[in-house]
Image (spheres, rainbow, N blue to C red):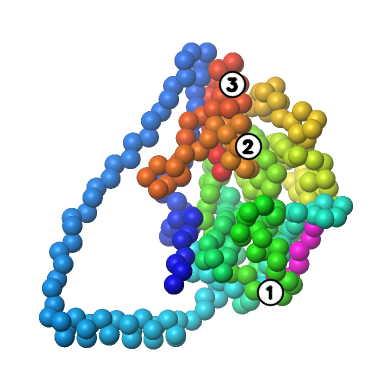
Amino acid sequence: MATFTPRTRFLPHFHRPHLRHRIYQFRNAPPIHRTQHTHTHAPPKPTRLKLPPPLSLFVAASGLIYYATTLHISPQPKDLNPQTFTAYTLTSRTPVATSSPSHTAIFSLRPVHPPGQQLPFTEGILSVQFKQPQLQIARSYTPLPSNAGGEDDGTLRFLVKLEPGGEVTRYLFSLGLQDKVFLRGPTVEYIFPPVGEVDKTLFIAGGTGIAPALQLAANSVAPETEIYWAVRSRAETEGAMAEEVERLVQRTGCKVSVRVFVDAEGGIGIRDVERGMEGGKVAVVVSGPEGFIKRVAGEKVWRGGHEEQGKLGGVIREVLEKRGGEVTVFKL
């Protein structure tokens, strides 16, 4: 029987341990590398209890009966939670590009049961896992900000791109309206800095990485948020996503600004990042495909089964080595 292997570790109260921003400091000198040390303690090896054969069979049979009975009567969870998957209904799928075919769309999902509580969007950037039932795998997506009128029925909206070879995205695009989708979460991926800690947040987003950028811009307490949105073609910024960005900018007033960078027109350069990092105490958040994150801020690394921020690199490092100074960087 296939087993479900989650890609994200969920924790009580929606938080991850050791979720910290990393501060990088350059004063026109060789860079300072801060090493993270992880201490582990191996638990004592368990002692195996030997039972007589008849008693072993009785214990095994009792366990199977209990498991089957519990599995049969286990109620379906009604509220979204980090431990179990909750049923949602696909109510709409809006293509992003105005031209056909569109490989990116906004999926709207309404909970089968009215939610008992709203998601804590004001704490930080949240992600939610989608389950692919045939292969028993899951992938995390960031909800878009709520519409201006609010979504009291618990509807969540996600920006999804159909990826070549992507099992979860292929499954989602195969669904029809009113089909069931199972979600689990949320997980806090990035905690908003407290009031007064930063003067400005620069969010550098690649492709569908704009979703967490919009979520941050809608809820962050930072006085100013500037979003750099890098895309391969301008078609990615048209239609439904153009409306999303315009609605958010209007709602937040002068607090949020969005600049679009098209690869064919030069993309994001070192001078653009340098200008974006001006303005006092700046927090930089980077989101997008792995290659994009590596080019902008250096790659994330896996160590001991956990994803870590890794060393600072890419364009941001070049800027700091050139001008010196200090900046807080977080890679989603």
Q: CA distance from mark 2 to mark 1?
A: 33 Å
Q: Say whether marks 2 and 1 touch (CB < 8 Å).
A: no
First of labels 3, 1 by sequence position: 1
Specify few, some or many for label 3: CA neighbours under 10 Å numbering under 14, 14-19, or 20 or more. Answer: some
Quarter the C terminus occupies: top right
Q: Secondary structure at mark 1?
A: loop
Residue position for label 2: 292
- Foreground residue, 206 or 122? 206
The part of the image, by quadrant, that contains residue 261 is top right
**Side (left or right) of 218 relative to 332:** right
The residues colored magenta run: 90-95
Give percent across and percent down for residue 159. 70, 55
Q: Which mark is residue 179?
A: 1
Q: Say above or below: 253 vs 26.
A: below
**Side (left or right) of 246 relative to 1:** right
Residue 163 falls inside the magenta stretch:
no
**Side (left or right) of 305 relative to 87:** left
Q: Say above or below: 134 vs 159.
A: below
Question: Amino acid type of disc 1?
Answer: Asp
Q: Which mark is residue 308?
A: none
The part of the image, by quadrant, that contains residue 266 is top right
Residue position for label 3: 318
Dominant SS type (magenta): strand
Question: Amino acid type of disc 2?
Answer: Phe
Q: Secondary structure at mark 2?
A: helix
Tell me the residue at 44%/85% (across/down): 72
Q: Secondary structure at mark 3?
A: helix
Tell me the residue at 16%/85% (across/down): 54
